[in-house]
Image (cartoon, rainbow, N blue to C red):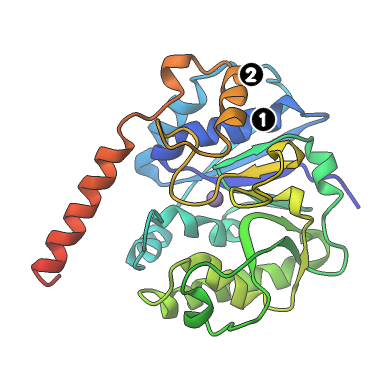
Amino acid sequence: MNTVRRVFLAYEPSYWRGLLCTLGSLSRSIEDYLVAEIMVQPCYLASLKRTLARIRWITSGKIEFNIIKITGAALRECKAFEYSGHFKPEICFRTYYFEFSNLSGNAAYIDIDTIVRKSLSQISSAIPENMPIAARAHLACHTSSSTDGSGSKKYFNSGVILFNNESFDNEIYERMSESRKLMADLSGRSVCLDQDALNIAFEHRWEELPVHFNYMTDDFQDRSASEGIILHATGSRKPWMLGSGHRFTREYIEEAEAIGLPPWNRYDAFWILRRLGKRSIQVIKKINGY
Ligand SMILES: [Mn+2]
């Protein structure tokens, strides 16, 4: 099985620290050559470029950034869905990746609230051989199990997905397009919209990824997070939010330091205000019957 040379991610400006930590940590353990394909809305392109320019990429020459601008039509589709909690249209971008990229060979999708502590070639050892994707089995989030029809069926977390695109390219393309249709049906009923849709579209067609390849916030609370290979800060509170008391804060600070993010840039001090603002808008909308 060939080593994965491509990872794809979706950029959202409020997660800029997360993107730097995900890509920074990946680039620190780079062995060979890596193409990071970043999907972005055209209006956030300048913000993405500013973010990438914030740190010095010590392994430049080994990592290539390929920015994929989401088309207007795709963006309109993503924006038409109803999102709950902290979710934004960017979570759907990955379902378009196989339309927009000229991918040949295998790829990995990684959320930008992760820290990757092993090289990509070590991670590619988990590329599934007989299934199109590998993902970490996890409990269906909140109400998803009742809304997505999966009931007690096996469910995966979609924060880290490895794609065997070499053997299953047509199937992946088809199932991704199926997941976009499903999102339209699930919109307004499902909490983890894209994740629910991916779970239905890839039902019985995924292999289990070992826990440490997607080590989530609530995993083995009594053990050290150092056993995680990819740490995934699940939930709406992220380690870079000041005072969030996140379980991975220490690992985040270590990573921020290692990639050279200055101390005054490491924390988001205004997340509570933004969240309160968003919540009051939701309440006002509700009162006014929107
Ligand atoms: Mn995530």
Quarter of the image that includes the C terminus? bottom left
Q: Which residue is mark 1?
A: 25
Tell me where residue 143 appears, x and y as whole percent: 46, 74
Q: Which callout, 1 or 2, points at the residue further toward the start of the chain?
A: 1
Tell me if label 1 and label 2 are in contact, CB under 8 Å: yes
Q: How many marks?
A: 2
Tell me where residue 88 appears, x and y as whole percent: 39, 55
Amino acid, disc 1: Ser
- Image: 243 above or below 71: above
Q: Would residue 102 appear left or right of 191 to someone viewing this image?
A: right
Tell me where residue 42 appears, x and y as whole percent: 39, 44
- Image: 61 above or below 46: above
Q: Which residue is mark 2?
A: 258
Residue 71 can be seen in this image = no
Tell me where residue 286 appears, x and y as whole percent: 16, 67
Residue 31, picture quadrant: top right
Q: Residues within 10 Å of mark 2 (few under 14, many from 20)?
A: few
Q: Disc 1 and disc 2: Cα gap in Å?
A: 8 Å
- Image: 161 above or below 228: below
Amino acid, disc 2: Ala
The front one of 220 and 195 is 220
**What residue sits 45% from the left and 39% below the top?**
15
